[in-house]
Amino acid sequence: MARDFGGGYPSPLTPSMAGDTVQPLFDTFSSDLGRLDQEVIELPLLLPRWQAMELEAAASRQGMTTGQMIRRVIGQMLAAQTTSAARS
């Protein structure tokens, strides 16, 4: 069982298992309202060293920083998810 680090949440270093309940990081809000919100939130991201190095190299080849590359990939994934949900 994961150790509780306050607020009823397990340690962020504890790996999740299939079927585990995933706790939301943020309060739920309307997606339309959220896209208008300009607030910035920092998300910690742990990657194996080789992935971080490959990501940095890929971003550099595209003339971007690693952060810009991550934001672009997330944006494209969310746009594709929205498009496929609209088709269903």
Image: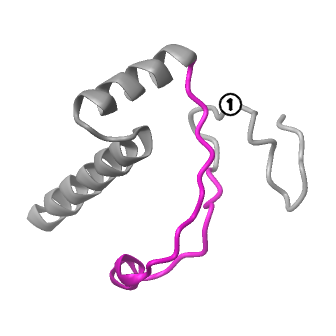
Query: What secondary structure do most residues of the magenta stretch adopt?
Result: loop
Q: How many marks?
A: 1
Image point 15% across, 57% down: which residue? 84
Query: Camera-side residue: 79 or 24?
Result: 79
Query: Camera-side residue: 13 or 19?
Result: 13
The residue at the far left in this view is 87
Picture coordinates of residue 66 (x, y %)? 42, 38
Q: Is residue 39 above or below residue 51?
A: below
Magenta span contains residue 24 = yes
Picture coordinates of residue 83 (x, y %)? 14, 61
Q: Classify mark 1: helix, strand or loop.
A: loop
Span of residues in magenta:
22-48
Graded by Cα atoms within 10 Å as few (under 14), some (14 to 19) or many (20 or more), the crowding at tag 1 reads few
Residue at the disc numbered 1: 15
The residue at the far top in this view is 50
Amino acid type at image mark 1:
Pro
Image point 25% across, 37% down: which residue? 63
Query: Camera-side residue: 57 or 86?
Result: 57
Image point 68% across, 31% down: which residue? 15
Check the picture and name the quadrant holding the N terminus.
Answer: top right
Magenta span contains residue 19 = no
